[in-house]
Image (spheres, rainbow, N blue to C red):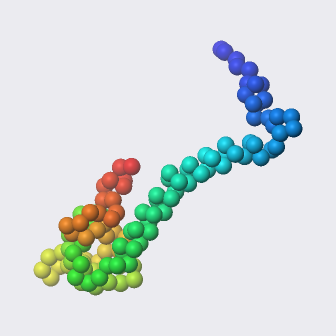
């Protein structure tokens, strides 16, 4: 069994004589900034894009759900949408389940891709 002496590792974290305690905060702040700009900010922008898309839906839009159901919006509710998927066949789906408009790039990821991540 090998034993390591970690004293020098902890000594590196100490404040140098006459140094400012803020020096230790700088690397932590840099890591937080990188995390924010690489992970959180793009997620926030994506959520705003999806919300704008859902707010802009209107009756007679041809949509695709994240589950792969194609149809045409016949009625809009606050949280749900009625979609006609065939003659005299209408279903009620959550607005959050709408992935995009038919023939255009998807705004949300399909359900199967989200589950596998």
Q: Residue furthest top?
A: 1
- Residue at coordinates 67% horizontally, 43% vertically from top-left? 27
Q: Is residue 6 above or below residue 36?
A: above
Query: How many marks are shown on the rendered structure?
Result: 0
- Residue at coordinates 29% horizontally, 63% vertically from top-left? 106
Q: Is residue 48 visible?
A: yes
Q: Is residue 92 above or below residue 116?
A: below
Most foreground residue, 92 or 32 = 32
Tell me: 21 left or right of 68.
right
Tell me: 55 left or right of 18.
left
* Percent position of residue 113, x then y: 32, 53
Q: Residue furthest left?
A: 87
Most foreground residue, 101 or 88 = 101
* Percent position of residue 1, x then y: 65, 14
* Percent position of residue 58, x then y: 29, 82
Most foreground residue, 23 or 39 = 23
Q: Is residue 69 visible?
A: no
Image quadrant where residue 49 sits: bottom left
Tell me: 10 left or right of 112.
right
Image quadrant where residue 81 sits: bottom left
- Residue at coordinates 46% horizontally, 59% vertically from top-left? 43
* Percent position of residue 57, x then y: 32, 79
Image quadrant where residue 78 sits: bottom left
């Amino acid at each position: 069994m090998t034993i390591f002496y970690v004293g020098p590792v902890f000594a590196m974290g100490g404040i140098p004589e006459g140094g400012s305690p803020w020096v230790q905060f700088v690397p932590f702040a840099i890591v937080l900034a990188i995390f924010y700009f690489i992970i959180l900010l793009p997620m926030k922008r994506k959520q705003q894009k999806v919300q704008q898309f859902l707010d802009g839906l209107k009756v007679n839009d041809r949509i695709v759900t994240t589950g792969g159901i194609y149809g045409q919006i016949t009625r809009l509710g606050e949280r749900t949408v009625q979609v006609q998927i065939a003659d005299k066949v209408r279903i009620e789906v959550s607005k959050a389940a709408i992935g995009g408009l038919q023939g255009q790039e998807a705004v949300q990821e399909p359900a199967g891709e989200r589950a596998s991540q």
